[in-house]
Amino acid sequence: MKCTRCREPAEVQLRAHNSAFCRPCFLFFFKRQVERAIAHEHMFTQAERLLVCVSGGKDSLALWDVLADMGYDTTGLYLGLGIGEYSDESHAKVEKFATSRGLPLRVIALESEAAGMAVPEVARFTRRPACAACGTMKRHYFDTAAFEGGFDVLVTGHNLDDEAARLMGNVLRWQRDYLARQRPVLAPTHPKFVRKVKPLYLTSEYETAVYAFMRRIDYIVDECPNAAGATQLIYKDTLNRLEAASPGTKMAFVKEFLRTAQPAFAEVDRQEPRECTRCGMPAYGELCSFCNLVRAVESKRRPAAAGASA
Ligand code: SF4
Ligand SMILES: [Zn+2]
Ligand SMILES: [Zn+2]
């Protein structure tokens, strides 16, 4: 197998792109894909300050690596979710990455914040699935960190596989609200929100894994222990089978949705957010979903604490 670009022996085959690449050409291809996504969707410019959400996994670290390499003004943001060894290990990987490249990193440990709540505790008290609680908390801390830090853009490492699985979930339940917001760039709907972008939305998980390997990025390989039962994984598995039978399926699914269907969903009437009466961040009700969660935990914690001291 020869490299599509330079005819040297190829190291990696990308069936969805009908291509094969040697190492230097793959790194060139990967970077060009990200550059094109940024330019095509007008995600950000060199003059803007980017806050890059990093989990310690391959996608977010590969993204931070490639953006820093392109000369963008990046700061990493790591959230300590309090999920045992997984959080300890992922935190260590992110610190090591930032230090080795001399990049600025902000770390927020959820247990040390005012609400003092880590993901497992919130899930236990509210009887919600861990991922639902985690999603609400992540969104809140990402938004507040971006706003308070004066950043222009919030960047996440969602890749093509994530976007295709999410699209499948949203379509299977016809969640019009979510479909209306499933875009690689979300313009802020409130002065306290910043633009949210996903530069890897057309880059597959396999490609980020290859990139991370070639760039010697030391990332956390283990999944979060809560991921095992997540429906998202079932969708990913299904999509992988479709992709194996017909390469390019995921790309066509996401691209064609964005081109043909998404604009129609985006016209669905959406309420403009007000401000949460508790934390001041944008909210669609009196409280934002994060403060609703905090309130639910507080109401459960009090009787538990009283029981413990009795
Ligand atoms: S798998 Fe669920 S709990 Fe774990 S980090 Fe992802 S969203 Fe959070
Ligand atoms: Zn080559
Ligand atoms: Zn709030």
Image (cartoon, rainbow, N blue to C red):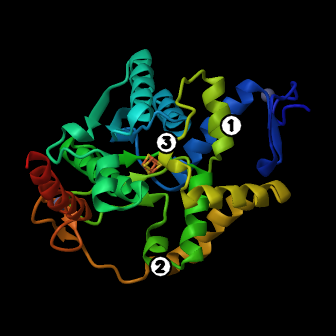
Looking at the rendered structure, the secondary structure element under dot 1 is helix
Q: Which residue is mark 2?
A: 176
Does mark 3 have its CB less than 8 Å from ligand 1? yes
Compared across the picture, whether 146 is left or right of 251 comes to: left
Identify the residue under disc 1: 29
The mark found on residue 123 in the picture is none
User: The residue under label 1 is which amino acid type?
Assistant: Phe
Residue at image x 10%, y 61%? 278
- Residue at 68 percent across and 41 percent down: it is 206
Residue 194 visible, this orientation: no
Which residue corresponds to mark 3?
224
What is the x, y in percent for residue 87?
40, 34
Q: Residue 183, image x and y in percent? A: 49, 63
Question: Can you say whether 270 is above or below 304 in the image?
Answer: below
Q: At label 2, which amino acid type do we have?
A: Arg
Three-letter code for the amino acid on which mark 3 is drawn: Cys
